[in-house]
Image (spheres, grey):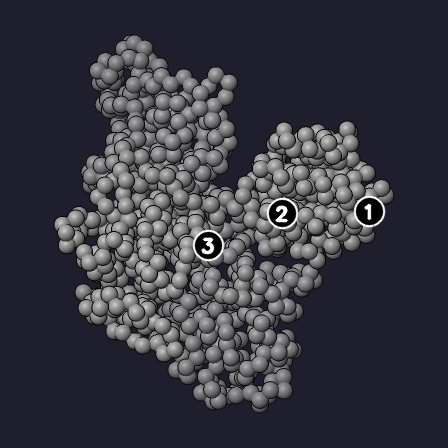
Amino acid sequence: MSIRNLEWMMRPTSVAVIGPSNKPGNIGGIILRNMLRGGFNGPIMPVNPRYQAVAGILTYPDVPSLPLAPDVAILCTPPVMVPGLIHQLGVRGTRAAVVITAGLSEQKTSEGITLQEAMLAAAKPHCLRILGPNCVGLLIPTLGLNATFAHTGIDAGSIAFVSQSGGFCTATLDWARSRGIGFSYFISLGNSADVDFGDVLDYLASDAQTSAILLYMESIGRHEARKFMSAARAASRNKPVLAIKAGRSPAAAKAAFSHTGALAGADNVYAAALRRAGILRVNTIDELFDAVETLARSKPLRGNRLAILTNGGGPGVIATDALIAEGGQLAELSGMTLKKLNERLPGTWSHGNPVDMIGDADAQTYRDSLQILLQDEGVDAVLVLNAPSALAPPVAAARGVVELVQQADRPILTSWLGGEAAQQARQVFAAAQIPTYNTPEQAVRAFMHMVRYHRNQDILNQVPPSMPTDFSPWPGVAKVVIDNALAENRQFLSEPEAKEVLAAYGLTVVETRIATDVADAVEQARAIGLPVALKILSADITHKSDVGGVALGLESLEEVQTAAQTMLQRISKKFPQAHISGFTVQQMASRPAAHELIIGMTTDEVFGPVLVFGQGGTAVEVIGDRTIALPPMNMSLARYTITRTEIFKLLQGYRDRPPADLDAIALALVQVSQLIIDRPEIVELDINPLFADHQGVLALDARMRIAPAPQGGPSRLAIRPYPQGLEETVYLHDGQEVLIRPIRPEDQPAHAEFISRLLPEDLRFRFLGVIRDVPTSEMARLVQIDYDREMAFIATTSDTTSPQTLAVVRTMTQSDNSRADFAVMVRSDLKHLGLGQLMMEKIIRYCRERGTAEIVGQVLRDNEPMLNLIRKLGFKVIQLDGTDRVEVRMELKAS
C-alpha cells in the first residue's frame, strides 16, 4: 500500500492488547507483560470480556468501551474474531494493528472468502494498516515498546531488523542480546497481508533513528516485486541495507524450456535483484551483524585492492588464500613502497604483499610499515594481522595501529590472533571504533562485504556512457513477426523469424533460410553459397544438437543432400513424435578466434523478465558460467554484467588471441534488454551461440517462445524502464524547438553544466536557501531516478551531438499516490520564453494522468515570478507562519 498511517504503528502513544488472559502461556498475556516490563510510557489497554484485570491492569470488555482510540492495537484472538475486531477498531479511530493470530488464510467465512481477505476488507475503509497476521509482533526499544511474545527484550540502537520468519526473529533477539547489539526497530512481518517489505523499507529509509536496515527474507509476493525494488533502491541510497535470503533451491529450473530457463534459478534471480537494489546479501546471522558493523565503522572504500600487513607468514598466507577464494584482489605494491619497506624492515621481510615484517615487529614497526602502505595509491584498504609474540606485546602493537587509523583516508581492518592478550588488543580497537575480527578469514570476509557493497552502490549511482548513436531499433518489424506467429497460434518462432526479430534491434545475425525438404535444402545452399550449416526445423525440438539435428561445414551440395537425408532418418528413430517442418540453411561463419557466448531471457514468476549472460555453446549448462541481470540495461550495467562471469577473463585477450569487442557485447545485452521491454509477448529467448571477437558479435542460433502479452505491459518488469512515451516536442516564444523528456542517468554531465550556469538567486529560489555547490553524489541522485515513484522532466536542445539541459521540473510522489511534491528550475538566461509554464503544465498533466490526488510545492515569498506563474496555473497559495516561504497546492482530477 504505502507508508500511509504507518506512523501510528511505528511511533504509537497508546496501545490496546486484545485477547490477553491470566492463563499461563497465553500469548496475549505474555505480550501484555512484555509491554509492562518494557517501560512504554503511554496508556496500555487490555481488552477481554472474561477478565476484570489481566496482569493487574484494568481490562475493558470490548473495543467500544476503550476510553480512547489506541494508536495501535495488538490482536491475539481466535482467527474468526479478527475481521470484526478490525472493523470495530477502524470505526473507533484506530489506524494500525498488529495481528499476532495465525490461520486467517486457511479459514473461510460464510461468504466463501478467507478470514484474511475479510480482515483486509474491514480495514480498507479506514486506511487501517495491518502488520501480520501470523507474526511475532513489533519492538521499538526507544519507546519501551515490546509488543511481542518473545522471551527477551532488546536494547535501543540504530539498526532496524525486519523478518518474515518468527522463529528467526526470536533466535536473532537472543543472539543480539548476548552480544549487546541494540535496535531502533525489530519488526516481524508474518504473512505480510498488508504491510510488507516495501512499506517498511519506505518508512525506515527516512527514519532518523535508523542508520542501517537488516532484512531476513524468504520470498517476495508475485505482485510486490516492483514495489520492493523501488523501495529498496530508495532506501539503499540513504543507508546500508543488508539481507539474508533463505531458500537457495534450484528446483524452479526443472521445467524450463531453454538453456536460459535452466540457468536462471530462482535464487540467482533474487541475488541479481538484491544487487540491482544496492543491497548487500549475506548468508548467516553472524555475517549479517559483522557486515553492518564493518560498514558502520570503516572509512569509505574506493576500490578492491587489499594490502596485508602481518608479523607472521602463516596468518598472511591464510588471509591471502581466503581473499583469492572470495574473488578478492591483492594490491600490487609500487616500487617506491617496496623501496621504503626495504629501508625500514629487516632483510628477511617478505619483499611483497602480504608484508611479513617478521615476528619481532614492535609497535613502532607496525606504525611505520602501515604508514608506508597507506601512502601507496595502489592500496585501497589494509588488513593488519598480529600473531602473539613475547618480543612484541600485542596490546602495544594495537595502540600503534590505532594512532594511524584515525588519520587514514581508507579502511583499515584488524585481526589479532590468540586468547587473553589478543582480547585486550581487540578491546583497544573496539574502543577506537575500529573493525576487528578473531581470525584472518573473518577479516577478509568483512573486507569482501565492503567490496560487494561498494559495487552495488556503484550500480545505483554510476553514470552510464552514452548509448551508441547507431542503435536505432525497428520495433514495428519485430511486432509484425511476433503478431503473425501468434495469429497462427504458435508458441515458438522459427529460427529465421527469431533472427529477424533480433536484427530489427540491431544484432548482427547469420543469414538463415528455410527449406521445406531435402531438395529445397540443396537449392537454398546453392543460393547462399558454400560452405553452409544445416539444422533441423521443428517446434518440438528445442536443443537440436542433442538429437543430431545440426550439421556444420558442409562444403558441397552432395554433402548437404546426404546430411539432410541422414538427419531425417536419425531423428525419426530418436524422436519419432516430432513434427518436422523442414530445415534451416545458413552461411558458415568463419570466426576462428571467436568466443561462444549466450545471451538469454526468461520470465521469473516474481521479478518478471530477467537476462542471462555467460559462456555459451552446447555445454552451457554443464559449464554453468553465467550471471543474471534485471532489465532495463544501460551500457554500464551491461559491462558490469559481463565482468561477473569467468569468461570475461578470456574476453580480455590472451597470448595471440586479441581482446573481444566488449562494447559490442555490452550493446548486444542492451539491445536484447530493449527488445524484451518493447515486446511483452516474448516469454523466453536464447541466443546461443553468440560469437564474440575483436570484430564484434554475431548471432548464430536463436530461439524464442512467445505468448499473448499479459495485462499491464511494462509493469511486468521489476524496474520501470525509461518511459519514452512521455517525450514531447514544444516551441518557445522565440520559435526555438525544445524536447521535453524524462531525465536519464546519461544526462549527468549536461545536468551539472545546467546547474553551474544558474545564478545564485535562482539556486536560492530552487533549494529554498543559500547553496554553494551540488556534490557529485547528489548530482548522481538527481539523474538516477526511479520512474515508478519520481519523475524529472528536462527540457533539452534538439542537438543530439551536444545536448544542453535548459530546464527541469521534478516530482516525488508518495507511494499511495495521494500527493506529489514538485520543484522547477529554468536556466537563468532563458527566462521570459514561456519555458517555465511549459514545464509546469507538463508535470501537472503527468500527475493527473497517473491519478495523483494533489501536487504540492513550497516557494520563497520573494520569488514573485514563480508565485505569479503558480497563481496563473490555478494553485492555491497558503501562508506558512514564521517562515520565509509559502505552500502551493493544486487538487488534481482525472480528465
Q: Which mark sits nearer the N-terminus, 1 or 2?
A: 1
Above or below, 208 against 287 in this view is: below
Q: Are marks 1 and 2 in contact (CB under 8 Å)?
A: no
Disc 1 residue type? Pro
Q: CA distance from mark 3 to mark 1?
A: 43 Å
How many numbered markers are drawn?
A: 3
**Label 2 belongs to which residue?**
408
Q: Is residue 354 visible?
A: yes
**Label 3 belongs to which residue?**
237
Q: Secondary structure at mark 3?
A: helix
Q: Position of residue 636 (x, y in %)?
A: 41, 39
Disc 3 residue type? Arg
Quadrant (top left/top right/bottom left/bottom right) for the C terminus: bottom left
Q: Which mark sits nearer the N-terminus, 3 or 2?
A: 3
Q: Quadrant of residue 231?
A: bottom left
Residue placed at 57% from the left, 77% from the top?
A: 28
- Most foreground residue, 426 or 682: 426
